[in-house]
Image (cartoon, rainbow, N blue to C red):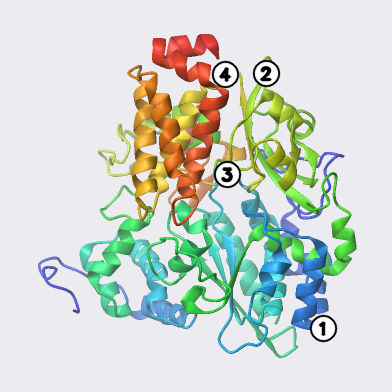
Amino acid sequence: MAGGAGVESVAHEPIFVGERKARLDEILTRYPTKQAALLPALWIVQETTGWISDAAMAEVADVLEVTPAYVKGVVTFYTMYHQHPVGENFIQVCTTTPCNLCGAEDVMNALLDHTGCGDLGATSPDGKFTVVEVECLGACGFATPVIVNDDFIDGVTVDSVPDLVRKYS
Amino acid sequence: MGYPHKSHPNETVVLSEHFGNPDARTYDGWIWRGGYKALEQALAMSPGDVVELVKASGLRGRGGAGFPTGLKWSFMPKEKRRPHYLCCNADESEPGTFKDREIMRWTPHAMIEGCAIAQYAIQAEITYIYVRGEFTEPLTIVEQALAEAYEHGVLGDNAMGTGTRLDMYIHRGAGAYICGEETALMNSIEGKRGNPRIKPPFPAAEGVFGMPTTINNVETLAAVPHIIAKGPEWYKGLCRSNPKSVGTKLFSVCGHVRRPGNYEVEMGFPLGELIHDLCGGVPEGRTLKACIPGGSSVPILNRDETEACLLDYEGCVEAGTMLGSGGVIVFDDSADMVYQVMRLARFYAHESCAQCTQCREGTAWTTRILERILAGEGEMHDLDVLLDLADQMTGKTICVLSDSCAAPVVSGIQKFRDEFEAYIRGGRAAAIAVA
């Protein structure tokens, strides 16, 4: 099932070569099954290309000896894997109850305004930002927590949003 | 950052002693503070003796269920015929809870040491530390601490020079609340969707990769080195109320309080004192309205119940709620309870793994009905429908996510019914008038 049917038309640069292949090989030593390396393998894909395409899922399936459909089932279960390209800076803002009580929805709206995204999940016209609303980020005492790419920033307020956005512009 | 706060004189600081001090994060800093002495001590004992010692201490699981830790360990096969595994549950995602995050951020070696001791006690060669995907900062810090622990021979094929194999790997989650449920967590480690499994078989018989497995929470494991070093009697002495609930517990206080943060107190500490004295109470000019003391999955307490509640497993049950994970969410009189209950229901609807009908449909229906009420289009009998739905969602599914959605809905309607009715009669304006 290497490659899978229907992906030939999409140009896909193999991901698991060289250093990334070595990394995956090391990860495989940690588990008694190949399938267990699926989440880490998907993280490597997303780190490399910013999202997880069908072609990438097919490559992962091939490497770990599972079906592409199985990989898709897993990718769609976990919210942090992107199934389509996102902005250069991916912003996750928590609006669950404790943060909500502390004004998280205002922070979210300020982020949508200042990044130019307008709507949740939409990418700004300059391609620089995508803002999504997420459930609890586990930093409820430091409302409002925001994750930009891999940076965890807590205590974000409406007033601190402009500086935050400028930093990543 | 809002953290760390200076510890309050009424706190009993054990796990959080070094919070805020980056030096304690390093291997050298940890050793300087007496780190890995307890591991050395444990490795000189038999695994069975370590289990007995932890059993004698009365330590109970800090992830939410409160199951006795030593007893859980004792369920693992004594005679080892197959690989054994330990899973450290660092998938902290219960709304209101942020204690494991701080343990990992400030004292990663405490967690590693606790894992190593537990791993030895249950005769496991491998620990998987399951860290939630969003915890980028704790992840980096734990990764570094693990590398240091390997470098100094704490872990590996010859752990602490004793010939025991102790390997530890991080498994990063990817955004799924349900993976904090122990059987879903094991599926996620196996590279599957995080669907909870039917029990039995229990993990000690058939866990990750079908092998005997123990799953413990970060805070539980971080308490273990202290118990080994200072003894079970010392631990049992840390108790303010019921002797079945002992030790210290980190409470993550958030929402409408002046000084949110993690507070470490002895079991049995009064909830009112925690909110008013340690956290400085609700903001100026406001009054306390409600509190969820154990993370979003437990019933909401009204003001009087909050003031009377003692923070231990039994005290919370007596107050009509549960200690859960110790995530204390405080609501003052400005809170719109109908809206907040809807937000909680929406959380569970979003996080349902959709295996069980009662949960998949129930969490979604509950959310939609609450949204309708909030939009001013509710009807009085919607409240009965919500309660009936909640009944259908409780005790009928593979895991307790569905029950967790029902808890705030039922307690919310019971305790703040006038606000729900006002919304139905006259929309938000009417609800504010009665709030």
Mark 1 — residue? B44
The kind of residue on which mark 2 rests is Thr
Mark toward the start of the polypeptide (4 vs 1):
1
Residue B334, numbered label: 4
Q: Nearer the viewer, residue A154 or B363?
A: B363
Secondary structure beneath dot 4 equals: loop
Q: Image quarter for residue B192?
A: bottom left
Distance from disc 1 to disc 2, alpha carbons, whole Å, reads: 54 Å
Distance from disc 4 to disc 2, alpha carbons, whole Å, reads: 9 Å
Please say if the residues under marks 4 and 2 sit with CB atoms less than 8 Å apart: no
- The 10 Å Cα crowd at callout 4, few under 14, some 14 to 19, many 20 or more, is some
Q: Is residue B391 left or right of residue B120?
A: left
Q: Is residue B152 left or right of residue B430?
A: right
Q: Is residue B342 left or right of residue A143?
A: left
Distance from disc 4 to disc 3, alpha carbons, whole Å, reads: 22 Å
Can residue B282 be seen here? no
Residue B410 placement (x, y as % from top left): 51, 32
- Residue B22 sits above or below residue A154 on the image: below
Marks 2, 3: nearer the viewer = 2
Mark 2 — residue? B287
Secondary structure beneath dot 3 equals: loop
- Same chain assignment for discs 4 and 1: yes
Dot 4: chain letter: B
- The 10 Å Cα crowd at callout 3, few under 14, some 14 to 19, many 20 or more, is many
Q: Quadrant of the N terminus of chain B?
A: top right
Mark 3 — residue? A139
Dot 1: chain letter: B
Q: Nearer the viewer, residue B149 or A139?
A: A139
The kind of residue on which mark 3 rests is Ala
Mark toward the start of the polypeptide (4 vs 2):
2
Mark toward the start of the polypeptide (1 vs 2):
1
